[in-house]
Image: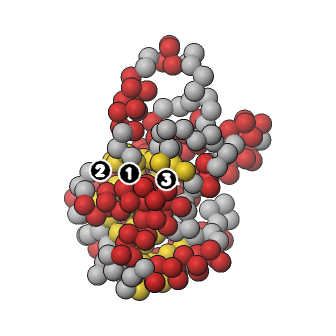
Amino acid sequence: MSTTVIIGATSAMAEHAARCFAADGDHLVLTARDEDKLSQVAEDLRIRGASQVDVLPTFDAIAPQGMDALLEEIRRSSLQYDRVLIAHGSLPDQGECEKNEEAMHQALEVNFSSTIRLCTLLANKLSEQEAGMLAVISSVAGLRGRQSNYVYGAAKGGLNIFLQGLRNRLFEKGVRVLTILPGFVDTPMTQEIEKGPLFVSAETAGTCIHKAMTKSSADVVYVPFFWRYILWVIRAIPESLFKRLKL
């Protein structure tokens, strides 16, 4: 039996990944922002085969007190964490971020600052264990800045670099750091975006995440895999041409 911690467990991708871990018989430790929904998810995972489901204090990434309570609970925990998945985040309105400094600040707080606070604490815990895995859902948006979502992309780009350094630091401790880069996934977060052929379901994405965490040794995974090739092309476009594109 493995202990798998999921932060942001009510997000669509994380919930489907959690169902896979439940089917494995894992001990699941969950937290998220919405207490009622979290309780529903926890009960569903018990039915689906999890050996045990515990719930940590709920938290809001832009509320310092909520984050502090969660961090303190993790510090006090005597559990051996075998796997941790950080899956919280939000997709901000780029236009609003351009007009409203507070909206931009909140987008960076949710998608970058709060995540690296969690990563720092969890990295120390896993380092002391000299074992375990820290997996973080980032985004392909962090691999090249585009006018349509560069605030979100900047947060995810910074997170990607942070995770690279953390991976380098923890390698000698036997701790795996996994960066997960989803492309377009059909979730409530993307409900305002017109769906196209590159979209995949949250269930497909969750299954890919579970597989990457349990059956792969990769440091970085694209969800689904074909985004690796799409981003290879996008990143190869010279900046002198790229800045002229409406992306």
Q: What is the three-letter code of the residue carrying label 2? A: Asp
Label 2 with label 1: CB-CB less than 8 Å:
yes
> x%, y% of residue 173?
24, 63
- What numbered label is drawn on residue 219? 2
> x%, y% of residue 143?
45, 36
Residue at (68% x, 38% y) in the render: 94
Q: Which residue is mark 3?
A: 201
> x%, y% of residue 184?
51, 44
Q: What is the three-letter code of the residue carrying label 3? A: Ser
Front residue (pair 63, 22): 22
Alpha carbons under labels 2 and 1: distance apart: 6 Å
> x%, y% of residue 112?
54, 51
Q: Residues within 10 Å of mark 2 (few under 14, many from 20)?
A: some
Front residue (pair 144, 125): 144
Quadrant housing residue 227: top left
- What numbered label is drawn on residue 179? 1
Q: Is residue 49 above or below residue 142?
A: below
Alpha carbons under labels 1 and 3: distance apart: 20 Å
Q: Is residue 187 above or below residue 197?
A: below
Q: Element type at marker 1?
A: strand
